[in-house]
Image (tube, rainbow, N blue to C red):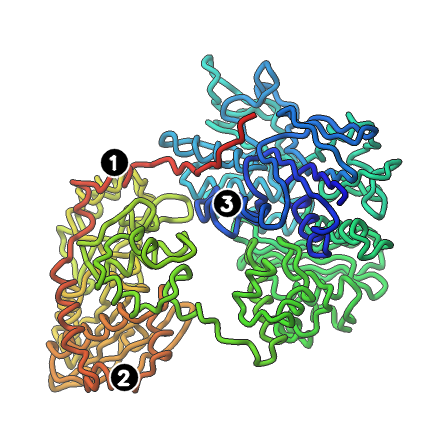
Amino acid sequence: MRKLVVIGNGMAGARTVEEIIARGGRGMFDITMIGDEPYGNYNRIMLSHVLAGETSVDDDDLMLNPMSWYGENGVTLYAGDRAMRLDRFAKIVTCESGRELSYDVALIATGSNSFFPNMDGLRDADGRLGAGVFGFRTIADTNGMLQMAQSRDGVKAVVVGGGLLGLEAAYGLRTQGLDVDVVHSPGHLMNQQLDERGGRILRDKIEALGVGVYTSKRTTAVLRDDDGAITGIAFNDGSPLPADMVIVAAGIRPNVELARSAGLVVERGIVVDDQMRCEDESSVYAVGECCQHRGETYGLVAPLWDQAVVLADVLTGNDAHAAYHGSRLTTKLKVAGIDVAAMGVKGPERDDDEFVQFYEPRSGVYKSVVVRDNKLIGAMLLGDVSKVSFLSQAFDDKVPLPAERIGMLFDLGTPSPATGAAELADDAQVCNCNGVTKGDIVSCVAAGASTLSDVVAKTRAGKGCGSCKGLVADIVAGTAGGGLAEDASANWYVPAIPMTKPELIAEVGKRGLRSVSEVFAAFAPAGEDATAKMPLASLLRVVWGPAWVDEPGALFINDRVHANIQRDGTFSVVPQIKGGVTTPGQLRRIADVAEKYDIPMVKLTGGQRIDLLGVKKQDLPKVWADLDMPSGYAYGKSFRTVKTCVGSDFCRYGLGDSTALGIAIETRFQGLESPGKLKLAVAGCPRNCSEALCKDLGVVAVGDGRWEVYIGGAAGAHIRKGDLLAVVDSGDDVLRLAGRFIQYYRENAKWLERTYAFVPRIGIEELRRLLVNDAEGICAGLQERIEESIAGYRDPWLQRAAPLSAAQITPSLPLLPLPKVPVR
C-alpha cells in the first residue's frame, strides 16, 4: 500500500481522510496523521458553546472523531506532535518529537492561525502572547479564557474584533458572568457578511445581552501595570478602555510556514490546482484554510468539505478527473444565539440591480435580496431565516425567482419550509457546520437508517450550531414517506439508559441507587452521557426526596445555586409570596434588599410575585438571609406558584375563596421536583381572572363549595385550554386530586415534558380513569409517595448557612479535562 501522511488533524484533514476511507482508501493507503493538539478531531464551531458552558470537551457534538475512531479505521495518529519539516525530495516529514515519516503522498491540512495585529503590550519579549491575552481558535485558548474568567470576581474582558468569532467569544464570556466589551475597527459588526443596516440590528441585539460595543475604533496597545497585569487597551485616538483580559479575534491567516520552508509556491495560501495538488509538485496536496485556489482562500467550512470530496475522488481513483472549481459561499449560522444567513453581494453594485429590503429594528428583523438579470446574486437575513432554503436554491439558479421579489422574503407564493425541503436539490447543503447535503441524508435513509436519530448520528446533520435541525427532520420525514420506524430510544427517559421512566424508577428503588453515577454504572452500557445528568438528578429527587446523593456536575447552575441565571450572568431571586398575598413587612424587606445590593430591576411577575433581577452570584446567600423569606422556586423544574384572584372575600362575583385555597395548594406542594415547571392558578368564579383555564393545573369555583379541576393548560409559547379532569365537592378534594395528578406526572412524564404535552399524550379519558375512578388501584400509592415527598421538603435557601460545598455559591473554576500529551 502507498503511504499517505496527513499533516493536520483538524476539520479539513480529518474530513478528507473520512472521504478517502469511504471510497475504499483503507485498502489503498497506509494512513498516518499528525496533529498539533492532544485530541482527536473536534468541531471548532462548537468552541463558543464550550466557552459558554453549554457543552464540554467530552461532548459528542464537539468531538467529530474521538481517539478511538483512528484505530477503528486503521489510521495512525500522532497527537500532540508537530510537523516541522517537509523534505519534498526525500519524501520525509520530520516532527518536533524527532519522528521521521516517509510518504508516497503528503497532504497539508494545517488550517489557519489567529491573526494578531501589531499592538504594544500584546507579546512578551520572547514573542509569546503576554499574560491575559488570548486568541479564540483552539481548546487551549478556550480553557485559558475559562480559567482566567473564573479566577476571581469582577474580571472584565475586551474582545478585539466584531466578526463571527469575536461575537461568539463575547457571548460565551458574558454567559460566564463577565463584563465584556467588543471593539471593532470597521463601522459596523460582521461587516464581511452584513451591510450597515444588518450590522445596526445585530449591534442592538448584542448590546441587549449586556455587551458593550465600540465600532470605528482601532486598538493600538494593551496596557499593563508594573507587574505586567493587563489594565486595559488604548485606541488610536489615545483613549483607554479598562480590561483585565484581552481576546483577539481580528481574523485568521492561512498557516503556510511548513509549506513555505519546503519550497512550495505560497501566496496568501498554498497555491493548488483544481485537483488540490500543490503547484509544481506531483505528490503533495493541500486542503482547507491553508490553501489558495484560483486566487481565493476560504475561512468557512463548506468549501473545505467540497475540497475534501474532490481530493478523495482523485487519490482513490474514484473519479480521476474530479475538479474543484471554487465555492459560492452561503452562510447560515447562529451568532450569540441570533440567526444570520448571508450569500453573495451585500447590496446593489449597478444602477439596474434590483434591491429589496425589509428593515424592522423593533423586532430585530432585517432581510434583503439583490437581483441582477433575473438572477439572485445576494441575500441577507437577520433574525428571521425561514426563507433561507428557497434563497439558497435561487442563489444556485435551481429555482425560478417570483415576479414579485418581495415573495423571496416572505411566504407570498414561494414554497413553505416543508415544501422547500421536498424541492431541494440533492446537492443542496443542509448542514453547513458538518458539510451534509440533502443527498447525504436521502442516501442515509435509503441505506437503512430507520429513525431520525440514526440519520443524525450517521451524517452529523444538525450537530453543529443546530440551526438546520428542522430542515433535517423535514427531509428525513419526506424521504421515508411514512416508512420511518419509531425510534426505540424515543421512549427512554434518558439517551444513555434503555428504560422508560417507570421502569427506571422501579429499578432505582429496588436497587437503592441514590446518585447519578450509581445509576450510570448500573444501567448505561455505553457509559455516561452528560445530557442525561439533569433528568437523572430530577428522577432521583422524585424517588428519594432529600435523601438522594448530590454529586458535583449533576445539576444545572439554576438548581445548584437556587436562583435563575440571566443572560448577563447575574441571577434572579423570587421570594415566595403564597397566592400573591404579601405584607407590609415583606415589601419593606424586599425594598431594603434591592437598595442594599444595588439590584438593577424589581419586577412583578406574571405569577403575582416580586422578582429581583441582576443579583451577583456571590451576593445570593446574603440576599436570601436579609429577605428572610422562603424560595419561590422561579428557577427550577418544579412546582412554582399558584396565582389567585381576589375570590369571595372582596369580589362581588366570587363563588369560592380562591385566595385561601391557592395558599393551601402552594403550602402543600411547594418546591416539589417535577419533569417540567408547574404553574397553577385558582379562580373564584368562572370569569377566570387568574387565568386558571390555561395553567398546568387550574381550579375554578362554580358555587356551593364545588370546584372544577383543569389540567394541561398553557398560555406561553404554546396556547392550550386545560382539560376538565373532574368537578369536586370541597377544597380538600382539590388538594387530594391535585396531589394524585402531580405525582403521576412526576413519575411518568418525560424530562422537560410540560403538562400541555403530557396530558394529550396520555389522554384525558385515561387520566380520569386512573386518577378519578382509580380503575387500576394506583391512587393510594400515589398519595403515599407524594406525602413522603411533602414531608421531606426543605427550603433550599437555608443552604446559605450550610452550603453543600465551598464552591456552591462562590464562583468556581470549571476546568475542562485534557487528554495527556504523548511524551516526546
Label 3 packing within 10 angstroms: few (<14), some (14-19), many (20+):
some
Name the residue beneath numbered marker 2. Answer: 724
**Front residue of this view, candidates 353 and 24:** 24
Indicate the secondary structure of the residue bearing disc 1. Answer: loop
Q: Nearer the viewer, mark 2 or mark 3?
A: 2
Q: Quadrant of residue 815?
A: top left
> In the rendered structure, which amino acid carries the disc numbered 3?
Glu
> In the rendered structure, which amino acid carries the disc numbered 2?
Leu
Indicate the secondary structure of the residue bearing disc 3. Answer: helix
Q: Earlier in the sequence, mark 2 or mark 3?
A: 3
Q: Nearer the viewer, mark 1 or mark 3?
A: 1
Name the residue beneath numbered marker 1. Answer: 806
From the top left corner, tell me how far across and down residue 328 is, in percent: 77, 54
Q: Earlier in the sequence, mark 1 or mark 3?
A: 3
From the top left corner, tell me how far across and down residue 85 is, in percent: 73, 26
Name the residue beneath numbered marker 3. Answer: 207
From the top left corner, tell me how far across and down residue 470 is, in percent: 56, 66
Q: Residue furthest front?
A: 1
Label 1 packing within 10 angstroms: few (<14), some (14-19), many (20+):
few
Q: Quadrant of residue 155?
A: top left
**Residue at point 39% right, 52% down?**
528
Q: Quadrant of residue 704?
A: bottom left
**Residue at point 57% right, 32% down?**
80
